[in-house]
Amino acid sequence: MKETRLGEFEEVILLLTGILGEEAYAFRIAQEFESQTSREVSIGAVHSTLTRLEDKGFLSSKMGKATAERGGRRKRIYTITAYGRRALEAARDFRISLWNQYPAFANKLSFE
Amino acid sequence: MLWFLRRDLAEEVQGDLEEKFYATAKERSLFRAKLNYWYQVFNYLRPFAIKGLSIHTNHFTMFRHYTKIAWRNILRDKAYFVINISGLALSMFCAILIILWIQDELSYEKFFPDHERIYRLVQDQHYDNGEMLRVASNPGILPLYIMENYSGVEQFTRVRPLPDKTLVQHGDTKFYEDITYVDSTFFQVFPFDFVTGDPATCLYDPNSAVITERLAKKYFGENWNEQDIQGKTIAINKNETFAITGVIKDPPANTHLKLDILLPFRKLYQYGWYLGWGNNYIYVYFLLDEGADPTALSNQFTALGKSRDDLTDILYLQALDDIHLYSDFDIDVYGSTELRHPYLTIFIVVTIAIILIACINFMNLATARSDKRAKEIGLRKTVGSQRHQIIMQLLSESVLITMIAFAVAVSGVLLFLPVFNSIADKSIVFSIEKWAVGAGFLSGAIFIGILAGSYPAFYLSAFNPVKVLKGTFIGGGATTFRKVLVVVQFSVTIMFLLGTAVVYKQFQYFMDKDLGYSKDLLLYMPVRGDIFSHYDGFKNQLSQHNEIKGVSYGSDLPTYTVHSFGGFDWDGKNPDDQVILHSFSVGADYIETMGLTLMEGRSFSLDTPADSSNYILNEAAVKSIGLKSPVGQRFTMWGREGKIIGVVKDFNFKSLHQKVEPLVLRMNPAWNTYLFVRMAPGNTRNTLALVEAAWKEFNPDYPFVYHFVNEQYEQLYVSEKRMAAVFDYFTLFTLFIACLGLIGLINHMVEKRKKEISIRKVLGASIATILVLLSREYMKLILIALVISTPLAGYFMYIWLQNYAYRIEPEWWMYALPGLLVFIIALTLVGGQTFKTARQNPVDNLKYE
């Protein structure tokens, strides 16, 4: 699955989508991103990435509920697809294998 | 933001932004929230979010589809396709050739890097009898004087081309060549490329010579480069030797300077009179300083001319770049005597006309046949095609067709170029280097495709699908626009036809007109070497033969002269008048040999020694001088006093562009340039052999060269001939294209009305009636075209004919014939098309009702 390359930003957004679950819409993801990374990001950038990920097949989306803060407008909720999950796993496995090869980090990593 | 945002994203984006706004307002401040809102909006200016931008457009797919459909359409109706291609290809073919020609004309002299700073000194000479001569040459000393007394000129060079060819010899190779004397500064003003030799010093030595590569090969062989050519000598005119000091690369064709052998101007100093103010044979070129103002200098020179008595009135500068296209001096060895640049305008206009006609054809045919596409368009619209998509489709079809036509046109040009070059007397090369030009043509072709296709595209795409699919749609037919187009096409055709007829007739007239002397069977030989010192022997020997009717000599050919002089005097002349008259020096039997008619008095006679200072005038001279009974009157030229012994009938010694001018004949053996021999009709070959034998006997060292006067005469009208040829082609093309258009239209109309025709037949109409019925509509249009074009064409022709002092009077048949011709052609076409359908068995067409 080496064709599915994820950029760093894309990977983070993808993971955040998984983390937020029902709350995974552009604004929330952007907000979470800023709080976790202390990097500022615009909603447009996030939205663009989300659309791209959707086009690549890693995400699916559907319209969710409308709320008052949004002036009665619905939000678009994104969910990771199976394909997306596989891509994330591939990315993680690749990183781990490289880190294992690097003597300083080898055998010191643990997951789960 | 809604202005640029994609509509389907609007809802979620706006929602997100509002949430962000409130969140920021709560955490920070209202101000920050507003600021941030702007920031967020800006960040939505991304490709994925902008209206109309689709990353996944299907434009590419659509174009493949359009091409497929276009191709199928083409195959469906090959005849129509061929008509279109021919018309468009032909028009583009013409356009390309014309543009190449114009490019070449405009490129004259650009070969010299400083061509913008090079100017030529020219004059308008005014005479007291009101005449004005425009002359491109000057006194020999003038440029030296100018260099000394005026600033602004960096360098000058004088050029003196010898009027006649001279014998050049190296070893056994001898030919007659053109010799030009130039100053040693010549190459500073005109930096030609040298193969060998030093441009700065090669013409210092008065016995040095610079030749072109072509001549080097001619005299020294193909391997001239390997020989040490510097210092090798050639003999000029048998006695004088010159050493080669340089060889230049052959000059390109697009410069007005024609060079073969260059000799140092210094050599001419032995003829002191070149250096004075009294002569006027030198061409003077100046290389101006950078930044010098040519107009100011020109004005200064004009003032100089006015201030000196021995100079003519008006001196001024002519730009080098203007020489080729804008010269119409009366005396100019390098230029032509008539302006060239009007031809450019004419050709451009004609080309545009042809292209327009082809486009009009295309439009006409496309709209006329629109009902064939109607169903397809209706269907497309029903399935959701938008109008602009249909327009795109139709435009791409027309562009495709145009591209194919373009390919045909280009291959045609490449094939035809050598022929074109020989007609137009040029050497145009359509090389790969000129890719910029090719790209220009390509975009031009695309433009034409779009132009031609635009009207049909808009017309067809407007169809109402409901009407079309229901079957109540009746498209096509001859709407007003289309009728106008046909009329325009045929008007232009008729005008061209008329033009051709008139030009042709005029040319015929020139060839057949009685010139006052007989130009046929008249031989002339330039005097070379010793032939003239043996003239009497030569003449006697030839006169013994019956085949020779006359031998004489003269200073000019009866086809052209530049010899005009002042210094005349006669009884009753106003001493202050400066009068210029043409004059020939001739031999004793000149009048008889040339076939001139003596009106009064007698011809020159060798028996009367006084005749060597006597004169014969032509009628025009007598009239202009104003003498009542000229014979016996006193007449003086250049101090030689004598009597007028005869008056000769006017004859045309210049081209028929001008009326006969005054001419003075005198017998002066010193000025012999040409020998004339009148041959009896019969075996020309034999007679020529006799003349050659005589020449060889008296002048063995110089090759025998002869020409016929009537051939020389035809040369005068080269430009008319060219015009005629061009007109012929254009007329043919226009006619062809217009007919194509007509055929297409008729064809379509007839097909559409098949059923109607069959019904009429069933009801008893004869074939003739049907023919008349169908063709009436179009014949009316042709008539209108006739009515419009004939007066217009007549008017243009009248203007053109004013150029000529001797011209034909347009006869009635010239107006009627083109129109009639076109009418008949059109009738045939229409008839032919309708006839086929008219003859059909009505049963076949009505079977399916």
Image (tube, grey):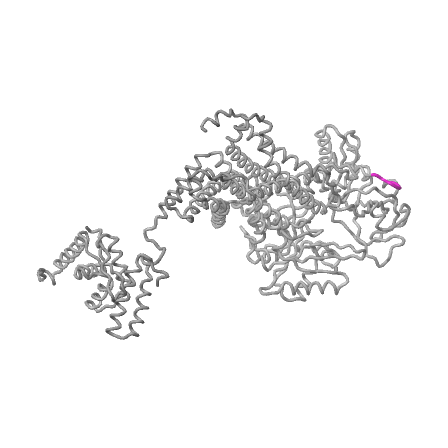
Residue B697, quarter of picture: top right
Q: Closer to the camera, B712 or B614? A: B712
Tell me which secondary structure the magenta stretch mostly adopts. strand
Visible residue check, residue B323: yes
Comparing B319 with B4, the one in front is B4
Asked if residue B15 is positioned above or below residue B681 in the image, the reply reads below
Q: Quadrant of the C terminus of chain B?
A: top left
Pick the residue in front: B542 or B645: B645
Q: Is residue B425 left or right of residue B409?
A: right
Q: Residue drawn at (89%, 54%), measured in percent from left and top?
A: B572
> Which x, y percent locates residue B79?
49, 34
Q: Residue B226, how many percent across, how many down?
A: 51, 45
Between B340 and B67, the one nearer to me in the picture: B67
| Residues shaded magenta | B597-602
x and y percent of residue B638 in the render? 82, 53
**Residue B433 can be seen, yes or no:** no
- The count of marks equals 0
- Asked whether B123 falls inside the magenta stretch, the response is no
Name the residue: 49% across, 24% down.
B843
Quadrant of the snapshot with the N terminus of chain B: bottom left
Q: Position of residue B175 (x, y in %)?
A: 64, 41
Give the residue furthest to the front: B763
